[in-house]
Image: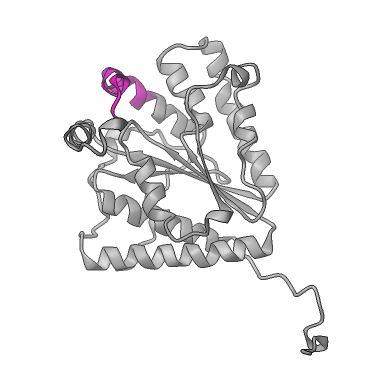
C-alpha cells in the first residue's frame, strides 16, 4: 500500500487549524497487522542507513520535535521509531520545567544549546513550544510576552534551517478518552505506575485550553522550513508507522552524498 505520509499528514500552510477536524483514530486506510509492521520496519531500516549517510557527509543535522498532551506517546515514539539508529549520532533532550539558571536567560537559550551538531539527529521530547503552550494556559508570563514568541520561534527555526539544520515537528494527536485509558493502564501496571503524577490528572481540566493553544501554535509556526505534522496517535502502531516514514522521507529529500575519500585509494598498498 503506497502512502505519502508526509503529504497526507502535513498541516497545510495558511489554513485555520481545528484539532476537532483531525481524527486521532485515523489510519489512512492501513490496518494493524503484518503489512503495517513490515512497512514500519522497512522505514526504520531506511532511517538507520540514512543516519549513517548523514553522519558521513557531516553537512547537515536533523532536529525532530515531539509535542503532545500527557500520554500522547512521545517516549514510545522515540523508543520504537529510533530503535535502529546508532546512539552515538542521536541525542534526546527532554524539556521539563525550566531551572533557575534557564529562567535567567531568554526562553530559547536552553533550546539552542541542545541543537544537534552536523551529522547528528536530535530529538526534543517537548520543546521551545512549551513557552507558548503551558505558559499561555497557566498564565505564567503576560500575554504581551508570550504572544511575541511565535515570531521569535519562526525566526529561530529559520536561522537553524539556513544553517543546514532540517526541522520536523510532530504533534501526537490523541483523544481525551484515549488519554484516560492510558492513565488507567499505567495505574494498573506496577512497572509503569511511577510515570503517573497528580499533575497529569490536574492538567486534564485544561484540555480545551491546551487544544486551543496547540491550534494557535500549529497555525502560527507552520513554515516551509519547519512544518508541523498532526499524527493520529490513538493507535500506537499507526503513530510509529507514520512518524518512521516521514523521518525516512525527509532524510531522503536532503539529497545527501558520501564524501570523497581523503586519500588516493589507488595508491594505498598493503604490506
211 part of magenta stretch:
yes
Q: Look at 74% across and 74% down and name the residue there.
A: 260
Highlighted range, magenta: 196-212
Looking at the image, is 65 positioned above or below residue 241? Answer: above
Q: How many marks can you see?
A: 0
Looking at the image, is 118 positioned above or below residue 129? Answer: below
Figure quadrant of residue 111: top right
Q: Main secondary structure of the magenta part?
A: helix
Looking at the image, is 115 positioned above or below residue 183? Answer: below
Question: Residue pushed farthest front?
Answer: 271
For the question of whether residue 8 can be seen, the reply is no
- Left or right relative to 109: residue 47: left
- Which x, y percent locates residue 70? 33, 31
Nearer to us in this view, 194 or 105: 194
Q: Look at 38% across and 68% down and name the residue there.
A: 42
266 part of magenta stretch:
no
Q: Look at 34% across and 27% down and name the residue there.
A: 211
- Left or right relative to 268: residue 225: left
Nearer to us in this view, 249 or 58: 58
Looking at the image, is 136 positioned above or below residue 68? Answer: above
- Left or right relative to 183: residue 160: right
- Which x, y percent locates residue 256? 63, 65
The quadrant of the image that shows the N terminus is: bottom left
The quadrant of the image that shows the C terminus is: bottom right
Q: Look at 25% across and 53% down and name the residue there.
A: 27
- Which x, y percent locates residue 187? 20, 31
Amino acid at each position: 500500500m503506497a502512502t505519502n505520509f508526509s503529504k497526507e499528514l502535513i498541516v497545510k500552510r495558511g489554513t485555520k487549524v481545528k484539532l476537532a477536524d483531525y481524527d486521532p483514530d485515523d489510519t489512512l486506510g492501513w490496518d494493524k497487522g503484518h503489512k503495517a509492521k513490515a512497512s514500519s520496519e522497512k522505514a526504520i531500516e531506511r532511517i538507520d542507513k540514512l543516519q549513517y549517510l548523514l553522519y558521513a557527509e557531516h553537512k547537515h543535522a536533523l532536529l525532530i520535535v515531539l509535542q503532545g498532551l500527557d500520554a500522547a506517546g512521545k517516549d514510545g515514539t522515540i523508543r520504537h521509531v529510533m530503535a535502529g539508529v546508532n546512539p552515538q549520532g542521536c541525542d534526546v533532550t527532554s524539556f521539563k520545567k525550566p531551572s533557575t539558571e534557564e529562567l535567567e536567560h531568554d526562553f530559547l537559550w536552553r533550546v539552542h544549546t541542545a541543537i544537534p551538531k552536523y551529522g547528528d539527529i536530535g530529538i526534543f521530547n517537548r520543546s521551545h513550544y512549551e513557552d507558548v503552550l503551558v505558559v499561555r494556559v497557566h498564565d505564567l508570563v503576560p500575554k504581551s510576552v508570550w504572544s511575541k514568541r511565535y515570531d521569535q520561534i519562526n525566526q529561530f527555526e529559520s536561522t537553524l534551517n539556513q544553517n543546514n539544520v532540517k526541522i520536523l515537528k510532530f504533534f501526537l494527536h490523541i483523544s481525551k478518552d484515549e488519554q484516560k485509558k492510558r492513565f488507567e493502564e499505567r495505574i494498573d501496571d506496577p512497572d509503569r505506575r511511577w510515570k503517573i503524577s497528580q499533575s497529569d490528572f490536574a492538567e486534564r481540566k485544561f484540555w480545551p485550553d491546551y487544544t486551543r493553544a496547540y491550534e494557535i501554535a500549529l497555525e502560527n509556526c507552520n513554515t516551509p522550513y519547519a512544518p508541523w505534522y498532526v499524527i493520529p496517535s490513538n493507535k500506537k502502531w499507526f503513530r510509529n508507522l507514520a512518524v518512521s516514514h516521514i523521518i525516512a522521507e525527509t532524510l531522503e529529500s536532503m539529497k545527501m552524498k558520501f564524501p570523497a575519500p581523503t586519500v588516493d585509494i589507488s595508491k594505498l598498498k598493503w604490506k
